[in-house]
Image (cartoon, rainbow, N blue to C red):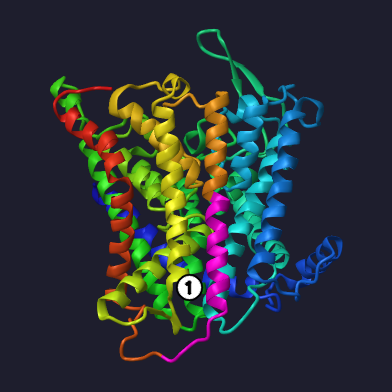
Amino acid sequence: MQINDWLQFALYLGLLTLITKPMGLYLMQVLDTNGRTWLDPVVKPVEKLTYKLLGTDPQSEQGWKQYTFAMLAFSLVGVVFTYAILRLQDLLPWNPQSLPGLSHHLAFNTAVSFTTNTNWQSYGGESTMSYFSQMVGLTFHNFVSAAVGIGIAAALVRGIARSSAKTLGNFWADLVRVTYYLLLPICIVFAIFLVSQGMIQNFDPYTKAKTLEGAEQVIAQGPMASQVAIKMLGTNGGGFVNANAAHPFENPTPLSNFIQMLSIFSIGSGLTYYLGRMVKNQGHGWAVWAAMMVLFVGGVLVCAHFEAAGNPIHQQLGIAVADGNMEGKEVRFGVFNSSLFATITTAASCGAVNSMHDSFTPIGGLVPLFMIELGEVVIGGVGAGLYGMLVFVILAVFIAGLMVGRTPEYLGKKIQAKEVKLAMLTLLVLTASILGFTAWACVSDWGVAGLNNNGPHGFSEMLYAYSSATGNNGSAFAGLTANTPWYNTTLGLAMLIGRFLMIVPIMALAGSLAGKQTVPPSAGTFPVNGATFTVLLIGIVLLVGALNFLPALALGPIVEHFLMGKGGLF
């Protein structure tokens, strides 16, 4: 890493730290149905009208079952709504390119993908989606899927903070307030900034231009700035165009690249401060934030080191590698910014990319893969990262309690068999889906047929695909041909499992914690703030990730790394 790289990294971490507290305080206002914000004079009438149309009372709180049922019902309607738009795309307006409707399996995969905040794309955006599909079918989910994730995180935090309670808030109030007071206002400002950087925002037909060789080139147009703003802020990641954030229309300048990276982490980072404020233990919120940051910084340094070192085979052939591994990198951003972006987008469950992960060195590619397989808890998706990390917090205090020979306690609440079982169930769901679907693809003709590489790199492509789908990340190694009936269907199922089969036990955990009575701390209570707890939490996250996925990683990027040193290519 050059001195300029260190300065950029320090600036990024410094600005992220500075916005964490104000974002957390604003989240307190937004997630409190009685909270007052500076937007109230404009937004409050619209909020009240929305509740009236929904027929719901925002002050009427729900238990964990009612909250979960409302979330599942809303998501189911969203899947059907988007599936219909995609299938009927050719009959709907704002389709200047006359693009046809999607196949049934691609429409299923895409509808599920955006509903679950995954935004996996088995298609090229500019050659497949009309403006109507992009804005009404997909951008709608970019907002509401992010709001759902934040709402679930808030419900779990309320369960931890409350004592002898039966309710966790109101799903419809959380959905509306997060969308109206948080996501929409920031995205309006963000989109204007992106337009100022040169990002396009129009409804024009695609432009046809003549190249110097006399060939015809089609240049995509469309409402990109509005979609890119929410795809980054809401950790969605789906690209308007196939090249995603490597395309100059989606990422025009180094400044737009930096601000997009900052926006990906902003809400997730602020939620850790919200946690500390809600449980009246700000040190705990910062301890969770510190654990996330240590894992993130470690991932960036490892990825950047191996990408800067380049491929030793190139050196053996006498190819200059002074700039590191530039294969698959956007030359405007270079090795370090590509490594930083790749780690951020996979740590945060975003999935946007400004370089092709398939072209990374084996260990460089292992970092984004492992970030996903940790459960997307290193900042993670908006909301999803916090509630995923809190599962590891439960396990950490349980293990700490076993160490001192006392019943584990977390912020004054006894952690018993039920809570540990629910926490472990969420982790087993993640592992079973990733490894199960990957194993199925490995031994199936349809799975092998989609590979563009053989050997361990081909295995990594499949492992990454199902890790990304189950982890609701959405990025890909980009070497896999996934737009086939089997891949679209199995990846869609993995997305549903990774989103909803993890949320249900987490909501049950929230309900169980809310019903417990808080007891005063005792001599045997393990403190959940400070460096000791942070180190324990990091150890639990890495230990569980290593135990679950190290054998699979050894068959893919790890063995490929050693074979590359011996001159092996795949």
The quarter holding residue 9 reads bottom left
Q: Which residues are magenta?
A: 499-520
Res. 355 in view: no
Q: Would residue 203 be found to the left or right of residue 320 on screen?
A: right
- Left or right of residue 290: residue 103: right
How many marks on residues?
A: 1
In the rendered image, residue 147, in percent from the top left (x then y), is placed at 63, 58
Please tell me whether mark 1 sits on a helix, a strand or a loop. Answer: helix
Does the magenta-highlighted stretch encompass residue 518?
yes
Position of the C terminus, as image quadrant, is top left
| Residue 227, image x, y percentages | 63, 44
Residue at 81 percent across and 30 percent down: it is 92
Q: Residue furthest top?
A: 214
At label 1, the amino acid type is Tyr
**For the point 73% across and 41% down, which residue is it?**
80
Residue 569 horizontal/vertical position (percent): 24, 22
Of all residues shown, which one is farthest toward the front? 417
**Residue at point 43% right, 55% down?**
427
Q: Chief secondary structure of the magenta span?
A: helix
Q: Residues within 10 Å of mark 1 (few under 14, many from 20)?
A: many
Q: Is residue 81 above or below residue 269?
A: above
Q: Is residue 533 magenta?
A: no
Q: Is residue 493 above or below residue 167?
A: above
The answer to whether any part of residue 408 appears in the image is yes
Looking at the image, residue 249 sits to the left or right of residue 10; the answer is right
Identified at 34% across, 65% down, the residue is 291
Note whether 187 is above or below 200 in the view shown. Answer: below
Disc 1: which residue: 273
Identify which residue, 31 or 443, lies in the foreground: 443
> Closest to the observer: 124 or 206?
124
Q: Is residue 430 left or right of residue 116?
A: left
